[in-house]
Image (cartoon, rainbow, N blue to C red):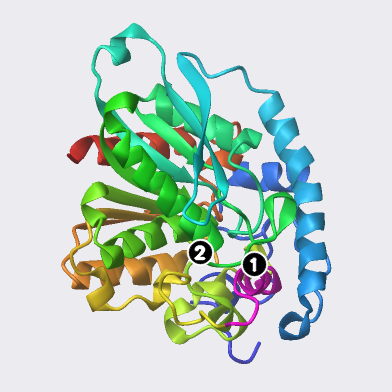
């Protein structure tokens, strides 16, 4: 037990702590993650030997990760009734690299909300560590439906992933697509019935929405973004996951919630040679005060039991120090993404609170 103190939280106080025995977790999550989601199975997939893993080995890992995850999501979301009062359509635009970018547009259909146009717009960048999943997967279709049902027009970006079924496109391909989708949405606000734009995303999508704002500021079009809402963002990069610095102790405290090797693997597939390890457009955690000054209002929402918790909190503090209006929010009792897509059925109250918070933030801006 040397080096541990029972007064410290999580694994810092008890190295034998597990998901089921962590006293901080909402009990509803334990059952869902062990029965429905097969907690531990994804982390047990072979990720090679960390820094020595080849690009091919990491691509194989991502293929297995998606193959295991997709049926789980299909099972959970296949049980849900359709979200009422929402319509969906697809636009395909040309990206700045000459590629096609499908955009999945979800908007309110009922007359009461339609009469209130224009509405706040959300450009949604989905999770998956910038390397997995599709904006049209069931968990993200439902998330956009729920946001639209609250009275927003939601544009989901089918950005190029660094691996998986939409790979293999390393940084900055995915970011370029998110930026291109945001600029297209801004140029088409009137046709879309949008008053202003918030870029928003979770996990890897949290990285991308924050990086989109940084890119917009650097390139001189930040006025097209009214706000940013990032939840459980994945920001620090492989170096931090391999050897966590003191300010990111949640990586050690909550390591039983996600394997460190998995976190590092996502980063290494996004930037295989590590050439962008200190580039804030790849890893917003690296942003300086000069990068952040002049950004629009932000909300940074984190999960108490997430290994990534502290990097979101550090980023929020950096924003505040740079003079950016910033709301910092911690959802207690939840693991990574535990208040978003994956827990719609298990914890509808917590899930709904985050939906309402995004809507309230977007509606407060202009």
Can see residue 207? yes
Where residue 148 sits, quadrant-wise, is top left
* Residue 335 vertical position relative to residue 31 in the rendered view, above or below: below
Where residue 213 sits, quadrant-wise, is bottom left
Span of residues in magenta = 260-274
Which residue does the image show at 30% across and 39% down from the upper left? Answer: 187
Q: Of residues 26 and 269, which is closer to you in this image?
A: 269
Return the x and y of residue 129 as percentages of the image width and height: 59, 60
* Residue 45 vertical position relative to residue 239 in the rendered view, above or below: above
Q: Is-magenta flag for residue 301?
A: no
Q: Can you say which quadrant of the picture contains the N terminus?
A: bottom right
> Which secondary structure, mark 2?
loop
Q: Residue furthest bottom?
A: 2
Question: Label 2, on which residue?
Answer: 234
Question: Label 1, on which residue?
Answer: 266
Circles 1, 2 touching at the beta carbon (< 8 Å): yes
Horizontally, residue 270 falls left or right of residue 70, namely left
């Amino acid at each position: 037990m040397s080096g541990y103190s029972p007064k410290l939280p999580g694994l810092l106080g008890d190295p034998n702590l597990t998901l089921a025995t962590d006293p901080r977790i909402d009990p509803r999550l334990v059952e869902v993650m062990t029965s429905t989601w097969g907690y531990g199975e994804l982390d047990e997939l072979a990720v090679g030997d960390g820094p020595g893993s080849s690009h091919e080995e990491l691509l194989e890992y991502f293929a297995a990760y998606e193959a295991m995850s997709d049926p789980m999501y299909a099972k959970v979301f296949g049980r849900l009734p359709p979200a009422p009062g929402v319509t969906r359509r697809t636009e395909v635009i040309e990206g700045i690299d000459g590629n096609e970018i499908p955009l999945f547009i979800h908007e309110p259909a009922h007359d009461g909300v339609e009469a209130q146009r224009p509405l706040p717009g959300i450009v949604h960048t989905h999770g998956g560590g910038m390397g997995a999943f599709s904006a049209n997967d069931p968990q993200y279709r439902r998330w956009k439906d729920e946001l639209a049902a609250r009275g927003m027009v939601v544009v989901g970006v089918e950005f190029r992933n660094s691996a998986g079924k939409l790979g293999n496109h390393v940084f900055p391909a995915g970011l370029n697509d998110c930026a291109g989708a945001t600029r297209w949405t801004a140029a088409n606000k009137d046709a879309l019935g949008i008053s202003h734009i918030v870029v928003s995303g979770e996990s890897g999508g949290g990285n991308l929405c924050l990086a989109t704002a940084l890119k917009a500021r650097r390139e001189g079009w930040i006025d097209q973004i009214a706000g940013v809402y990032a939840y459980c963002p994945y920001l620090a990069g492989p170096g931090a996951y391999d050897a966590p610095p003191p300010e990111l102790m949640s990586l050690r405290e909550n390591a039983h919630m996600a394997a460190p090797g998995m976190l590092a693997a996502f980063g290494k597939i996004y930037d295989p040679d590590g050439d962008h390890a200190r580039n804030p457009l790849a890893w917003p955690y690296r942003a300086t005060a000069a990068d952040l000054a002049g950004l629009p209002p932000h909300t940074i929402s984190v999960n108490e039991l997430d290994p990534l918790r502290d990097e979101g909190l550090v980023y929020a503090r950096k924003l505040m120090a740079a003079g950016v209006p910033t709301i910092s929010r911690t959802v207690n009792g939840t693991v990574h993404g535990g208040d978003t897509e994956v827990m719609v059925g298990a914890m509808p109250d917590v899930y709904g609170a985050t939906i309402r918070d995004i809507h309230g933030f977007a509606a407060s801006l202009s």
